[in-house]
Image (cartoon, helix red, strand yellow):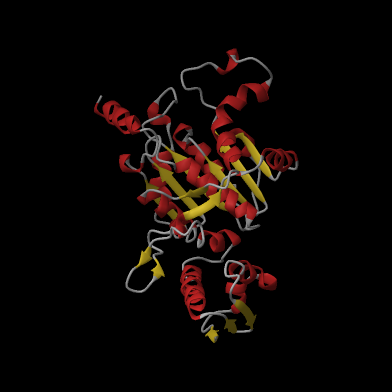
Amino acid sequence: MNRKIELQEIDPVDIYGVNNKLFDLFASHFPKVKAVARGSEITLVGAAADLDSFEVRFDTLRRLRATKPALTEYDVESLFEGDSAPRNPEEGQVDLSEGNEHIIVYSNEGRAIRARTKNQKKLVREYYKNDLLFAVGPAGTGKTYTAIALAVRALKNREVKRLILTRPAVEAGERLGFLPGDLKDKLDPYLQPLYDALQDMIPGKKLQSFMEDGVIQIAPLAYMRGRTLDHAFVILDEAQNTSLNQLKMFLTRMGADSKFIVTGDMTQIDLPHKEDSGLARSIELVQSIKGISVIEFGREDIVRHPLVTKIVDAFEKA
């Protein structure tokens, strides 16, 4: 049986990818269908049931393309993860509202890393619309992990040339000076949560290579001064421990074709005086600017052990 699909009001390259790379990947999931894409027309040959399945998934891919600037190999693969994508029983279509489009990237073990909660999904949506995002809320809500997953995805898809992760080196009750080793050894404990997330998503040797080549940089906030960060995905973590001037310094590092995400938790300020934190004031000053979005995470977004939510509640009441 023969069938044709016409692409209307869309550039075929947006669906096919460069040199038909995305289309070939998509078609590889239908070994019983012969699919040929030429210009705005796709010709299919196969059994009716196989062609129906091809069209349903391809329509999903087209609708997904309409929600974001560009498709990637991860988007294509996400349509076929298991065969567990929820379907609309009346139309037989994959439900994009709760389905695989929330996959951001895959872990080293092949596990899908996805936006799981309402505000994690909002962070992903706002990322595609804005160049600067603030993600604020309590511990365990996945703010930093989701941001790093977006950064790794952007790096793998060559949307950016560099990935830069930074934190203020502020002591949470400990004394930096008493830690053993040189400056790097003293600072590494502050940056370890960022290493942990990256090690989930990038193989060890590749990560080491990226860091040696400067493709991925992890450094204290003070190291950002004087730099212009072009073609980079930059994440500032633990921003509640920065002053207003430090945040201004960081935000003004933004260069051409860059994405910035600032994460923080106003209940975990480790500065000597909590009023010294510049995060809340910075958000007030810039949140009305076009291209900037603020996502406020809540207790309902906590994805750690169930006890974490109760712990957060107990401390907030105290």
Task: Choose between 235 and 252: the one closer to the eye.
Answer: 235
Residue displayed at 68% across by 53% down = 161
- Quadrant of residue 278 in the image? top left
Task: Choose between 208 and 27: the one closer to the eye.
Answer: 27
| Residue 66 higher or lower than 229, as above or below | below
Residue displayed at 63% across by 84% down = 39
- Quadrant of residue 186 in the image? top right
The reply, left or right, for residue 152 in relation to residue 142 is: right
Q: Position of residue 94 (x, y in %)?
A: 42, 66
The reply, left or right, for residue 29 in relation to residue 84 is: right
Q: Give the number of marks.
A: 0
Task: Choose between 215 and 149: the one closer to the eye.
Answer: 149
- Residue occupying the far top of the picture: 178
Q: Position of residue 175 (x, y in %)?
A: 53, 16
| Residue 251 higher or lower than 76, as above or below | above
| Residue 218 higher or lower than 287, as above or below | above
- Quadrant of residue 33 in the image? bottom right
The reply, left or right, for residue 158 in relation to residue 278 is: right
Visible in this render: residue 261?
no
Task: Choose between 231 and 56: the one closer to the eye.
Answer: 56
Residue displayed at 40% across by 29% down = 268
Q: Position of residue 203 (x, y in %)?
A: 66, 41
Which part of the image, by quadrant, shows the C terminus? top left
Q: Position of residue 190 (x, y in %)?
A: 56, 27
Which part of the image, by quadrant, shows the N terminus? bottom right
